[in-house]
Image: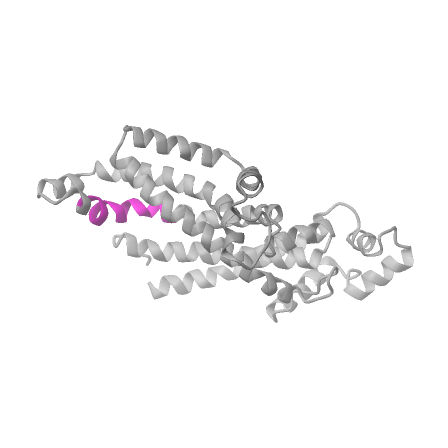
Amino acid sequence: MKKYIAKRLLLLIPIMLGASLLSFSILYLAPGDPAELMLERQLQGAPTQEQIDAFKEKHGLNAPVPIQFGGWLYKISHGDLGTSLRTEEPVLKEFLNRFPASLVLFFLSQIISIAIGIPLGIISAVKHNSKVDHFSRLIAMFGVSMPNFWLGLLLILFFAVYLDLFPAFGYGEISHIILPAVALGVSGCASIMRLMRASMLEVLNLDYIRTARAKGLCEQVVIVKHGLKNALIPVVTFIGFHIGHLFSGMVIIETVFAWPGVGRFLIQSIHSRDFPVIQGFVLIIAMFCVFAILIVDILYTYLDPRIRYE
């Protein structure tokens, strides 16, 4: 197992090089001259040719692209992701300032997804084709189909405007995070519920489950001890790969609820053509996704001892 983890960590090097190349390419994939676009936003008007040339000279944009990429790699290997053109603060500092708010929102939405999705999926599978099953599937279908931003607006309308139970915006108190966490967690909850139900139905029909029941074990022990562990494998896979989707959802939800996190700052940076922030944030988010997938692979061996990575 240690050998496998070491190999996976080495494999992260080319993956992160690819991610850094894609992040760097954002500067040149945008239509138009990047220097001109950035200066237009800074100066609130069309820059002169002298200003464009001076900007390119200052930021090294006159050098060939491979040399620029090599210089960018050298900087990020030393923890320097550049400086924000909008705030003139280091990109890494801007990310760390907003990361705690995003982290809290991320974990709470994941807790909502897992704590509701897994039990509901198990109940739906155990009570297959019952009214509870049909109702759960109906709710899950709505949860999967409804876009995050639309659900967020509905929550604001009902719970903040009409009922006045929770604040629509703000940060610092528990009541502020309830609505954005629910809006972000519902789609994941619905997906986990559907996946858990399908996986549990498959496991409950296997021979070793019938054997456990024939031995006289109570149904609760059969489901929790013998069935749940194997049924969780595809759910864990989904949760790992869902993290990337969750980050994209956070960008929207943080904007809808004015949540002071990484996603909202990224949207503001995109609007202001702040390329160093966009490049740095995309690279850091890619790193989180890669490490999340690595953790999922390691969890496989715990859930199913038959899985061995040699």
Q: At which x and y percent is residue 239?
A: 42, 48
Magenta segment, which residues? Answer: 222-236
70 to 189, vertically: above or below: below
Residue, x 54% and y 55% (percent of image)? 286
Magenta span includes 32: no
Res 15 seen here: no
Q: Quadrant of the C terminus?
A: bottom left
177 to 130, vertically: above or below: below
Main structural element of the magenta stretch: helix, strand or loop?
A: helix
- Nearest the eye: 257 or 291: 257
Res 98 seen here: yes
Residue, x 54% and y 50% (percent of image)? 247
Magenta span includes 229: yes
User: Quarter of the image holding residue 124?
Assistant: top left
100 to 180, vertically: above or below: below
- Nearest the eye: 134 or 266: 134
User: Quarter of the image holding residue 202?
Assistant: top left
Drawn side of residue 205 relative to residue 32, left or right: left
Q: At which x and y percent is residue 235?
A: 36, 45
Drawn side of residue 241 relative to residue 279, left or right: left
Q: Quadrant of the N terminus?
A: bottom left
Q: At which x and y percent is residue 295?
A: 40, 58
- Nearest the eye: 15 or 274: 274
